[in-house]
Image (cartoon, rainbow, N blue to C red):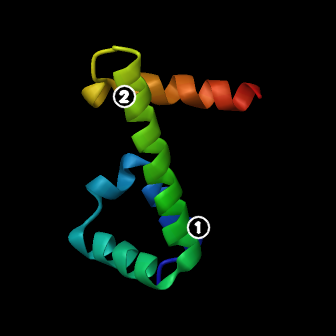
Amino acid sequence: MISCRDVTKLITSDQLLYESWLKRLEVKLHLLMCRHCSGVTRQLESLRKSARELWEVSNQPDPGNGGDELESRVLNKLLKK
């Protein structure tokens, strides 16, 4: 069984996109059974949704695959506080 630490690492990065279908299935099964990891997933989705809404409100073009810059700026702001 995959650990919570491994699941968190995979869902907070793009690494899960490049994993095998078996690993992705293992993560999905873990998320079905673990309320803590599924809570982290919901929180991440909420943050992503909020970031998209902020981009729309600020009349900025959609970052698309260039979202790394946005992610870096958000992380820098969070770390400064």
Residue 9 percent across, percent down from the top left: 51, 58
Q: Position of residue 76 (x, y in %)?
A: 63, 25
Q: Nearer the viewer, residue 61 or 67?
A: 61
Residue 53 is situated, as x and y percent measured from the top left of the image, at 39, 32
Q: Amino acid at mark 2?
A: Gly
* Quadrant occupied by the C terminus: top right
Q: Residues within 10 Å of mark 1 (few under 14, many from 20)?
A: few
Q: Depth check: 54 or 30 in front? A: 54
Q: Is residue 21 above or below residue 11?
A: below
Secondary structure at badge 2 equals helix
Instruction: Select label 1 or label 2 by which is in front.
Output: 2
Query: Cα distance, mark 1 to mark 2?
Result: 25 Å
Above or below — where is 9 with respect to 60? Answer: below
Residue depicted at 53% across the width and 55% down the height: 43
Q: Is residue 47 or residue 25 the one in the foreground? A: 47
What residue sits 44% from the left and 33% below the top? 51
The mark nearer the N terminus, 1 or 2, is 1
Q: Which mark is residue 67?
A: 2
Could you say where residue 50 lies in the image, as x and y percent from the top left? 46, 38
Give the residue type that dot 1 points to: Arg
Is residue 6 in sight in this rendering?
A: no
Relative to residue 69, is residue 66 drawn left or right? Answer: left
Q: Classify 16 as above or below 63.
A: below
Q: Is residue 7 left or right of residue 20?
A: right
Which residue is pictured at 41% across the width and 16% down the height?
Answer: 58
Which residue ends up furthest to the right in the rendered image? 81
**For the residue labelled by badge 1, is the local secondary structure a helix, a strand or a loop?**
helix
Residue carrying label 1: 5
- Residue 63 visible? The answer is yes
The disc label shown at residue 30, or none: none
Give neighbour class at mark 2: few <14, some 14-19, many 20+ (Cα, 10 Å): few
